[in-house]
């Protein structure tokens, strides 16, 4: 049998960056981390490459990735490339989803288990260890951003790698004086998703088909001189029905989680203080766990030594079992 | 029992590149690819490092590799290093084989399955998805190039990693006015090779021992102002006899393939047009498939936006089943 | 059951390196290596990133790693970061252990199986192919160095990744005129270690628990104009008692090895000559091999071509079976 492969490409842009248009920057850290009683040395160093250019017509293009992500950047799953002009900005690669309207302030210097993070449905690269995240779908994404006056709109589409699921995210932010408010809506539907469930005894990874996750989020950020207060409110729901099949688990889940979070940062000269708290209430859990309220909170401080260096420390409490439960819906 | 390890090294050159002698350049792209009806987002970014120096005696030395190939470059299988002077140029690493006298123009911005590629026997890094390629032997290579007046000669030797096969390539090009002609001969013999066969139903990878592949290629390139026409004619033969053994398949193959290809590129101000066509005729296939003619063709266009950016698009047809058959000899 | 995760971080420093504070350097080599009769092409190219900065208070901070180690550097197992000032220098990552007071001169351009290397107990990144090395424990380390006048002291602590072993190293060097002498003591205790034993027939990797390795080393370096002579004397002992358990081998080993080594380097204009010899005497081997003396020696020469390039060659003999035996204690 004869099979024809017909391939076409439509390129938005390809940029070549001469040496003068590439910048190499980096960051490093060293310290000690204590996690649930286990204390370990913790250090790292990273390098970031950025390329940029301008077309004769005045469009800007460029991209960036970290040295450790070089292979992913070659495959389009890490780093990102962009082109921007009067029409807005189009980015592709490992970009934020459109419904990502805000994240609370982080504490410590390692992020301390990302306890401050809110997860967004349309964010294909979501970390399934974060409360409220429904699996990590991976894959490349495209993000379109447009700003006019005080309004910025973001629209994203994810090209998920696991079975043809589709994800869309939409977010709008509006800034007026010291206040910025945002609202986002995201959905991921169809395909197969990896989800972490807490089944009452253990924190198990399940693979389910026909999963649908949607979220609606509002956020507000208020700046009062050296103090910034941020609030996030998110409704999230999961609908999953999966028969037992090869590589899949039989599950019927319909649940929702309501998360409310607040963070405050304050600068006192060279000192920066940060604190956050998030409460997530799980409803309609069909896995046998009672309706639960999960809380996470943390505080941190850093001191600017000048020249790009800081001393930082932080403390966080993450309600682990409940986190797993919260991750269920 | 006592075992003595005697190790010696003879170094052609070792170069240390100070920061001033290293350049960092890169490229990026973003767009959409449609392959046989499946449309996906496609983006990437790459960074390339180049180092160079000059000895007191006037010899040039240097090397380069891409960020994603950093580990391969450390092991000598990716990127390359060179030293050059009046004696010519010696390169080691992932270099072209000597019999590689030409490649047709490519279309699109992703290469579209490399439909335009001719494979060369002595090229250890050949892609076994390309018609006429006999497996990917991998491994490091050395290439010696010498130019005098209009004549350039290339000689390569591959150090194959799979069982001691040896590969040699020789090519000569001659330029006279607008015309450049080339002739190459390459051979890979002995050892174990991975080969893709189309057995009438599926496209299966086989591992065979005692394989021998040779090719003879002639090419011509004619430049007429903004138009470049290129033609390639290649005879290639495979002889493989392999008994069923651990990790190997029992096969007896003696086949040849005759490939003829033509490409045309034309520049119209900021617009570049390209088209190619290759026809490969398979003869003496011993795997049950009839003698076949395989065709691949593609067209593409790009528009120079200035500043290093272009918009590009292309369309290609690759006769898949026949490609597999053509890959057989 | 509810589980609380309490995480804290105490950061010594985090540095952000602007493009102007990052330097990119590199090295390359190409040549031929003959190992026990097998001759192969050998080439490589590497790039190294270095970042540095100075705080307002005059402390220096920075770090570096190679492109091929980018992922390890992100995880703190490759490359290193440091902060230094009047208090000395603290480094974290893939640093030398404190008991590493000296290494003999190497020959050739590939190191020729590291035949010149002395292994140190507290060096978590030790190569278990080197005589006298007791497994490769991997993992991150911290090194504190302090110099005052002619005295330099190094103290290291390793955070081993395999089962909670702890390693400490202490070394002091004293320089007086042309002579530098050093003394070091290192120990790694507890946890599970991978060790290579020569059991009389083969060179087998064993996994043992409750292993304890200690070493005491003295070294001296004397510079006479263009000639440098270096000597190392090391006592090393291994105590291991391991029951047969999942993933572990039943072994009872108590052995020691006494190593003596000498190297000489000499410069004659653009030519550099180097030679080394090491003799290791194994005692108390409980694995059935007789008490053995293992010898390794090598000679090499290099010629400086200017501009950062050299031609180098070397020859080394490594007593393989005995090396394995010597690696036993």
Image: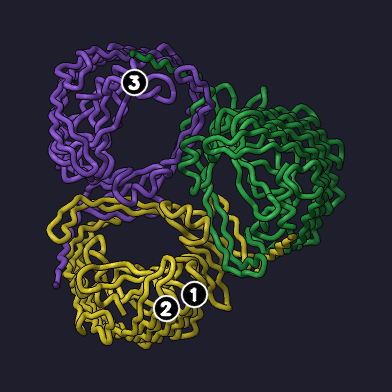
Chain colours: A purple, B yellow, C green
User: CB under 8 Å between callouts 2 and 1?
Assistant: yes
- Residue sitting at x 45%, y 78%: B210
Identify which residue, B279 or C202, lies in the foreground: C202
Q: Is mark 2 on a helix, strand or loop?
A: strand
Q: Crowding at label 1, few (<14), some or many (≥20) Cα neighbours within 10 Å?
A: many
Q: Give how far across and how far down residue A162 sits, in percent.
A: 22, 44
For disc 2, the chain is: B
Alpha carbon distance from label 3 to label 2: 58 Å
Query: Is B327 above or below relative to C294?
Result: below
Tell me, for residue B211, which label it has, or none.
Answer: 2
The residue to which callout 1 is attached is B165
Q: Give how far across and how far down residue A290 sits, in percent.
A: 21, 13
Q: Crowding at label 3, few (<14), some or many (≥20) Cα neighbours within 10 Å?
A: many
- The answer to whether residue C267 is left or right of residue C251 is right
Residues beneath discs 3 and 2 located on the same chain: no
On the image, which quarter does residue B306 sit in? bottom left
The residue to which callout 3 is attached is A115
- The answer to whether residue B197 is left or right of residue B295 is right
Query: Is B251 above or below relative to C162?
Result: below
- Residue sitting at x 57%, y 55%: C27
């Amino acid at each position: 049998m004869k099979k024809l492969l017909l391939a076409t490409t439509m390129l938005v842009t390809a940029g070549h960056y001469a040496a003068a248009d590439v910048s190499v920057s980096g960051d490093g850290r060293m310290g000690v981390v204590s996690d649930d009683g286990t204390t370990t040395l913790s250090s790292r160093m990273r390098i970031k490459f950025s390329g940029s250019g301008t077309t004769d017509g005045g469009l800007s293009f460029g991209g960036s990735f970290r040295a450790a992500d070089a292979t992913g950047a070659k495959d389009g799953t890490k780093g990102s490339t962009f082109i921007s002009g009067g029409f807005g900005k189009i980015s592709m690669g490992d970009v934020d989803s459109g419904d990502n309207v805000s994240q609370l302030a982080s504490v410590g210097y390692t992020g301390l288990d990302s306890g401050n993070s809110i997860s967004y449905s349309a964010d294909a690269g979501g970390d399934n260890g974060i409360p409220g995240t429904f699996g990590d779908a991976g894959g490349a994404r495209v993000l379109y951003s447009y700003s006019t006056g005080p309004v910025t709109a973001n629209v994203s589409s994810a090209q998920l790698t696991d079975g043809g699921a589709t994800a869309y995210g939409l977010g709008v932010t509006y800034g007026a004086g010291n206040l910025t408010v945002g609202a986002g809506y995201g959905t991921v539907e169809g395909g197969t998703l990896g989800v972490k469930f807490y089944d009452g005894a253990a924190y198990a990874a399940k693979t389910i088909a026909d999963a649908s996750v949607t979220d609606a989020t509002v956020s507000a950020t208020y700046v009062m001189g050296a103090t910034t207060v941020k609030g996030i409110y998110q409704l999230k729901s999961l609908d999953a029905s999966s028969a037992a099949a090869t590589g899949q688990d039989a599950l019927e889940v319909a649940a929702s989680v309501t998360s409310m979070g607040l963070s405050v940062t304050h600068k006192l000269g060279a000192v920066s203080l940060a604190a956050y708290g998030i409460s997530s209430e799980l409803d309609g859990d069909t896995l046998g766990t009672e309706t639960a309220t999960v809380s996470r909170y943390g505080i941190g401080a850093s001191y600017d030594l000048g020249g790009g260096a800081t001393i930082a420390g932080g403390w966080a409490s993450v309600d682990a079992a409940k986190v797993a439960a919260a991750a269920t819906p």
